[in-house]
Image (cartoon, rainbow, N blue to C red):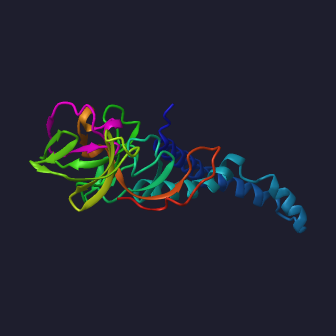
Amino acid sequence: MNIDFPLVLVLSVFVTGLIWLVDAVFWAPGRRARFAEAIRGVEDEETREKIGRGFAEPGIVDFSRSLFPVLLIVLVLRSFLVEPFQIPSGSMLPTLQVGDFILVNKYEYGIRMPVIGNKVVEIGDPERGDIIVFRFPDNPRINYIKRVVGLPGDRIRYEEKTLYVNGERFDQKVLAELPPGNPDRQLVEERIGPITHQIYRNIGNPGPAREWQVPAGEYFVMGDNRDHSNDSRYWGTVPDHFLVGRAFAIWVHWKSLWSLPSFKRNGSIQ
């Protein structure tokens, strides 16, 4: 089951804030007036405190008043600054491993409204080579993470396991065979614009050459684990309004609840 956490968070902020506001405007003044009337003429401080307990704010109000500021801060940070994500699959190997917890910059591609994702402030756009988190176009409740290889207007060609953008071949250098002596699976260094990163590719069964034209306002994305990634080659491009942000750092690796978290992979993401 996919829980829409941003929606849950927004609703929680709204409900706790509303309860706190209604109490402050309508209920609290009456409680204070009744308490003042009840302690009129009572000089003993202990007795006054005992009477005051009978006029204490309801538990739901106390809970909402305490929780609302915390939820509001989390909402602002998560919606407009930085949001954590966990890598659930191996489609971005070797760059990102299953169990990596990453941080995503939420403002670099523009300030967007929580839940609906509409951009309200223009700041910047994805660049070729960026690793982005986005809402899956076929099911916007699911977040995907891939690398941008094509910008709006680009013509993408994928032939013999090699990428061409507008007729220009991406530089590739074989680093290793996996395992050694097996030429079919390779660890490859690839250069996309200013970004140099590593990919996995299987040489066997290269398949037919294919080409795509990237529409205006959309992006062509691929996984670094090229032959084990469900990406733009199969379901199309990513519209700008589905962008969530740019992945920029790994902060912890925690594969499962039964393993210990590790900070050995901490660092920026290329």
Q: Position of residue 109 (x, y in %)?
A: 29, 56
Q: Does residue 3 appear to the left or right of 174 in the view shown?
A: right
Q: Is residue 256 left or right of residue 196?
A: right
Residue 112, percent from left and from top = 34, 52
Question: Does 258 sit above or below residue 48?
Answer: above
- Nearer-the-camera pick, 171 or 176: 176
Magenta residues, start to end: 202-231
Q: Residue at x 60, y 54 (%)?
A: 261
Please identify the residue farthest to the front as the structure is shown: 181
Is residue 270 at all visible to an observer of this figure?
yes
Residue at the image position 40 percent from the left and 57 percent from the top? 80
Left or right of 205 in this view: 9: right
Residue 209 covered by magenta stretch? yes
Q: Nearer the viewer, residue 250 or 29?
A: 250
Observer-nearest residue: 194 or 32? 194
Q: Relative to 225, is 42 above or below?
A: below
